[in-house]
Amino acid sequence: SWVRKSNLWNFALKGLERRINGVILNSYLSGNSRHLWVINYEEKKWLHSPEEFNKLIEAARYDWGMAWKDEIWEDGVDLLKEIQEICLARNIIFAVIIFPVEAQVLIEDHFSGWKKPQDKLILVLKRNNIPYLDLLPILRTHRNEDIFWDHCHFTPRGAAIVGEAIADFLKETLLAQK
């Protein structure tokens, strides 16, 4: 649209970028390293380098990178089982939708461990007969499109793709169970 091409839009985006970078810098200076991964992310070295991808995951270890850490999975599995039991007791269909981060959508798929969180979660879901929708393969078919605003938030185009996939999943999988 014309708004995206306007100088006002670019000015607003640059201002937002300066504020975000200021928040990250202030966070770092105050001893909080939760958002330091953003600097690595913006450089996009991880697109073609397994080593850089692993560095990015490690830098994001207090944020989305935590999904690659084995130690979080034990509690996560227990929580999923508890949610499933609560739903079953109330005759509620429980299903999981798995959202990737943008880095997983954009990188080369031959990197070892690039979809470790999905692989671990899908294994648990299958063992417990929990229906799921993994958005990673769907979004990778659209990887050359503008579908992410940032590492995890969708553009309107990305939201449309995800919305359609979820609607199809609900129709085909969940309604068939009733």
Image: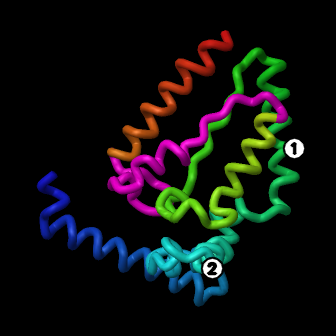
Q: Is residue 104 left or right of residue 149?
A: right
Q: Is residue 78 magenta?
A: no
Q: Residue at x 21, y 73 (%)?
A: 11
Looking at numbered disc 1 in the image, what kind of residue is underneath it? Asp
Q: Residues within 10 Å of mark 2 (few under 14, many from 20)?
A: few
Q: Position of residue 34 (x, y in %)?
A: 63, 74
Q: Position of residue 46 (x, y in %)?
A: 53, 75
Q: Residue at x 16, y 57 (%)?
A: 3
Q: How is the image coloured?
A: rainbow
Q: What number is the disc on residue 120? A: none
Vertical position of residue 144 compared to residue 9: above or below: above
Q: Is residue 149 left or right of residue 152?
A: left
Residue at mark 2: 51
Can residue 140 be seen here? The reply is: yes
Vertical position of residue 120 compared to residue 11: above or below: above
Picture quadrant where residue 36 is located: bottom right
Q: Nearer the viewer, mark 1 or mark 2?
A: 2
Looking at numbered disc 2 in the image, what kind of residue is underneath it? Glu
Residue at mark 1: 78
Q: Is residue 134 magenta?
A: yes
Q: Secondary structure at mark 2?
A: helix
Q: Which residues are magenta?
A: 127-156
Q: Is residue 114 left or right of residue 46?
A: right
Q: Residue at x 50, y 56 (%)?
A: 105
**Marks 1 and 2, the one that precedes in the sequence:** 2
Q: Secondary structure at mark 1?
A: helix
Q: Position of residue 73 (x, y in %)?
A: 82, 54
Q: Residue at x 71, y 59 (%)?
A: 67
Between residues 92 and 128, which one lies in front from this camera angle? 128
**Contact between labelled residues 2 and 1, with CB atoms less than 8 Å apart:** no
Between residues 72 and 55, which one lies in front from this camera angle? 55
